[in-house]
Structure formats: C-alpha cells, structure tokens
Amino acid sequence: MNFKEKKTIHIILESLFKSYSKRVPYVNKITNELIQRQIISNQNDIVNDHIAFRTMGVKNLGINSFEKIFIHHGYKKRDFLNFKLKKLNAYWYSHNEKNMPRIFISELKVDELSKKSKNIIYKYTDQVKKDPVDELDLDNVNNVIKFLKKPLWSIPSFEDYNNLLKESEYASWVIYNRYYLNHYTISIHDLNKNHNTLEKFNRFLENIDIKLNDSGGFIKKSKDGLLLQSSTVANKVKAKFSDNINSIISGSYVEFAERKILPEYKNLPIEEIESKHRRDGFEASNADKIFESTYKKQTNRK
C-alpha cells in the first residue's frame, strides 16, 4: 500500500499487512514472482481490492464492535450479506479516498450452533466483559495496532478446537486465530494486459505452484458476470494449544478479484476507466466459496 500522506488509518493498514504477510508465505512468493517477471516493480504497485476479518457474533464482540475502528477512520458501511448454511452474516465497507481497500467483516451466528459448540465458544468469549473497542483511543495508532495483535481470550485447548472444527470450520478458525487478518486481495484488472484477467492470472499462479481453492470452481463468478474471484488455499501455521498439544492448522490466504467495467461505461477509452466505472461490492455466492479457503477439504487437497 502506497500512501503519499500517511494518516492514522494508513499506518494501521500497513501494520496489518506487515504482520499478515509474515504469516502467509504465498504473499511474498506471488509478489516476488510478479517483480521478477517485471509485471510490478514492488509491493506498492499492487492495488489491494479488499481485506477481510472474521469475528464471533456474541455480546461485546462481532461486527458491531469491530467495525467501529474503520467507521471512525472514514469507512462507510455498505451492503449486508447472509450465508445461511455457514451461519454467517457480513457487511462490507468503503472509503472515499482513492485506492483504499474495501473492508469485509463477517461474524458467526453463534446462537444458531449446537449447545456443545455454543458452550465452547462462550467459555472463551465470556472472558471479554465489555466491548474492547470502546476502551481504545482510535486516533492513537499504537493503541489500535496493539489491539489488533493481542488475543482477546485465552488460547483454546486442542479438544475444544477440534470439537468446533466438526461443526463449524469458521468457528475453529476464529477461536484460535482471533482477529488475524484473514486475507488481502490483489486487484487483477489493475495489472498489465498480460495478467489483467483472472483467467490469465490463475495460469500464472498455477505456473508458480500456488494451490487454488477449487470450491465452486477455480473462478467464482457473480450472477451478473462482472465480479470474478479466486483465492489460494490457506497457508498452514504451527499452533500450540493450551493443553500443550502442537498441531498444524489453517492460517490465512490470498484472494484475487477482477472487477469488470459496468455496461454503461463499456465504450469509454480504457485510459479513462476508474474504479467507479467498474463493478463494486460483493456477491454472497462468490464469498460463500471463498470462505472455504481455510477448510480442511481445501488445505488437505493434493
């Protein structure tokens, strides 16, 4: 992310990306290959379409808490999305400033889970007695960065993690990973003409041995055909649980988005095309399959 005049939100976003990229080897692998092939000169040449977070929909946490950080710094709440089978709700947020990534925040509808899973989740989330974001000075960069890196509840036991995994892989991901950045998204249409469609870019990824999520197909397409998305499977991370058991679990991943030009602007010269001329927002059917990038069916696929 390249910001000419850095504001608090810029520094927060850069810090999030720095921590995330250290944890997700695919990030640097893809960037380095793009640099070697002279498609970009450095990471700042990549336009970040959006970043995503996962939360628990419980008292003092969830979307209503987490979104305050971004709304305070100029983001506007946009569309609501519902994922019935996965028991998730989500909203996305946009910023008026050019090249600011959209924010996508989802939450698990904990009350819709089995009693056993609810009790496991509450055992940890009940440790949060009040909305932690309300305690922050949101204009203090260090305060916000520290908050986004600190665990909100104790490390789960391996048994609890596995029990949640059986009912909701989203729940197990959040109970261990908490507010880690779930993914960032490379804006494909902003790359050069040899790589500016998802079909071309996916071929590039396959050539450098990046494993892609194939749930719903390698390219997930919106009903209007104007939003195309792909993602890697999640990189795995070493996890140490409270009962001293070590295990390899799903971490975060990288997403790729191609936003096509809206029909009413298709005759504009390409050099005049801006983000406002392209398909905006998200598509629940696409996002539903992207969520599965952290699922065992994807990460264990050969």
Image: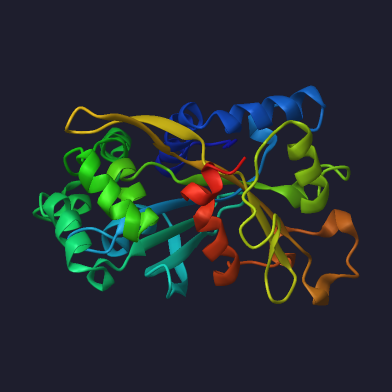
- Say which of 137 and 81 sits in front: 81
Q: Front-most of 33 and 149?
A: 33
Front residue (pair 117, 1): 117
Q: Where in the figure is residue 16, as x and y percent of width and height? A: 43, 37
Query: Along the horizontal axis of the image, is 3 left or right of 222?
Result: left
Residue 191 appears in the rendering: no
- The structure residue drawn at horizontal position 23% and vertical position 33%, both measured from the top left corner, is 241
Residue 298 left/right relative to 33: left
Q: Residue at x 18, y 33 (%)?
A: 242
The residue depicted at 29 percent of the width and 33 percent of the height is 142
Res. 47 in view = yes
* Image spot of residue 289 (x, y percent): 56, 61
| Residue 221, horizontal then vertical, whole percent | 70, 66
Indicate the quadrant containing the C terminus: top left, top right, bottom left or bottom right: top right
Left or right: where 76 falls relative to 128: right
Whether residue 183 is situated above or below residue 15 in the rendered picture: below
Whether residue 153 is situated above or below residue 17 in the rendered picture: below
Question: Is 224 left, or right, of 38 in this rendering?
Answer: left
Where is residue 215 drawn, in percent x and y?
61, 58
Q: Nearer the viewer, residue 60 or 26?
A: 26
- Indicate the colouring scheme: rainbow
Q: In the rendered image, which quarter contains the N terminus?
A: top right
